[in-house]
Image: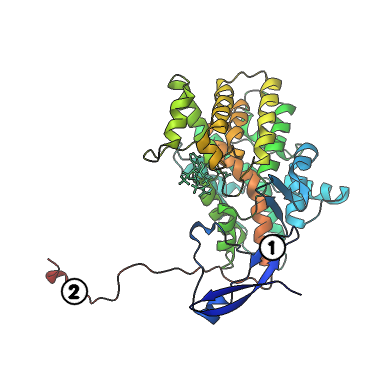
Amino acid sequence: MDKTAKVVLDGQEYELPVVVGTEDEVGIDISKFRGTSGAITLDSGYANTGSCKSEICFIDGEKGILRYRGYPIEQLAEHAKFPEVAYLLINGELPTAAQYESFRQDLTYHSMIHEDMKKFFEGFRHTAHPMAILSAMVTSLSSYYPEVDDDADDHNIIRLLAKVKTVAAYAYKKSIGQPFVQPQNKLAYCANFLHMMFAVPTEPYEVDPVLEDALNVLLILHADHEQNCSTSTVRMVGSSQANLYASMSAGISALWGPLHGGANQKVIEMLNMIQQDGGGIDKYVAKAKDKSDPFRLFGFGHRVYKNFDPRATILRKSAESVLDRLGVHDPMLEIARQLEEVALKDEYFIERNLYPNVDFYSGIIYRAMGIPTDMFTVMFALGRLPGWIAHWKELRNDPSSRINRPRQIYTGAGERDYVGIADRG
Ligand code: ACO
């Protein structure tokens, strides 16, 4: 028999259907509750609200589990290539060798940016944050590639995945006043991006395989994370049937905030501040615990993980090995390790289940790779793009999906009469 839940409101009992997921997660379906009871459910910040059913990503925050389409993140990070993971997220299955080859080629042959679009970059100040450039350029792509036929979505998905790495690298070149470097068809996805970032016309550039491997792992770890703030934004915007580019641009804007993807930039700024202040960890842990101080330990805490973020566990090891292989000694890594050690033993952090999240160690790896701090969130966006696309596509293909439109409890003034400006005092 199907499970149900009962709610008693003003003495009246309501029976609500219960939805059970693949991993036995339980959701009470309240979609018809207002119709029968007149009441809504209130959940500020959506801490306990499921907004959709989805087949893409599974997280068990209590156990520290993350899987894409059933595959454990640890296995994908160790063995897969980023385009393979992108294919998996978007299409539901790992590609066969032939499918992978064709996908890889598509991602290569659509990498160039329309010559006219390159002029858009001229309009930005050289000080512009690359996230501002990225979101503007992604939405601008819709003016070049409108949805004109039935296969438009599939074509646009390929174009977007292929071109965003070029836009991201151009945003960086713009900020340092160097000429844009064209993508090269002989290079794989990650190598092509690194080439466009770091090659200069005056000397040959060979992609360092250590950087390529490190980038591959970082992008895979960021590729999806179910209904996080930016993905929910993509679904929210996509639910009005806004086009792919507009929906992704909205996701990029949501990601930018320091409580979400922008935290990777904030972590390095925080570690820098601690270093410049003499390296005293305790003062900053005390500040983070002080409720009258707005300071938080960036890279700590997560809405869903109440245990180690499995991505942070992988990145902690990866940071050590990448710095080692590159021969980089970064005092930030030492400060980060000490900060983690102190925080994990502190009652405040233990009680609240605050552990390092994915952003805590990623910035240290990006720094060692030579990527500047204000590009970190762009790197996150590059990784998260396939996840956003997968969710947008799932929503688009779901005949039962409706425009997303939450309700509210109004707490403003009661009805009152308009008073003319002359009589307002
Ligand atoms: N430093 C100090 N205290 C913290 C931190 C932190 N980083 N994170 C949470 N807390 C405290 C809160 O003050 C709160 O304490 P209280 O119960 O005494 O009021 C408690 O822990 C719960 O925190 P909330 O803010 O209610 O948790 P929420 O789920 O809303 O927020 C978030 C999660 C935004 C990630 C939060 O932990 C945070 O601000 N972390 C720092 C920013 C960060 O690293 N963001 C990246 C997240 S991962 C990602 O998006 C990729």
* Among numbered discs 1 and 2, the one appearing first in the sequence: 1
Query: Residue 385, percent across and down?
Result: 64, 49
Q: Residue furthest right?
A: 97
Say which of 185 and 135 sits in front. Answer: 135
Can you tell me whether the CB of the residue at mark 1 lies under 8 Å from the nearest atom of ligand 1? no
Q: Quadrant of residue 23?
A: bottom right
Residue at 42% across / 33% down in the picture?
287
**Quadrant the N terminus occupies:** bottom right
Circles 1 and 2: CB atoms closer than 8 Å: no
Q: Which residue is mark 1?
A: 394
Tag 1, which secondary structure?
A: helix
Residue 394 visible, this orientation: yes
To which residue does mark 2 refer?
419
Mark 2 C-beta closer than 8 Å to ligand 1: no
77 in relation to 317, above or below: below
Residue in the foreground of this view, choosing between 190 and 185: 190
Q: At label 1, which amino acid type do we have? A: Glu
Q: CA distance from mark 1 to mark 2?
A: 50 Å
Q: Is residue 348 above or below residue 1?
A: above
Quadrant for the C terminus in the image: bottom left
Q: Tell me the amino acid under the disc marked 2.
A: Val
Label 2: how many Cα within 10 Å (few below 14, some 14–19, many 20+): few
Q: Which residue appears at 46% of the width and 22% of the height?
A: 280
Q: Position of residue 181 (x, y in %)?
A: 63, 35
Residue 424 to residue 268: above or below: below
Q: Is residue 80 left or right of residue 396?
A: right
Percent coordinates x, y for residue 290 in the rendering: 41, 37
- Mark 2: secondary structure: loop
Which residue is most to the front?
A: 11
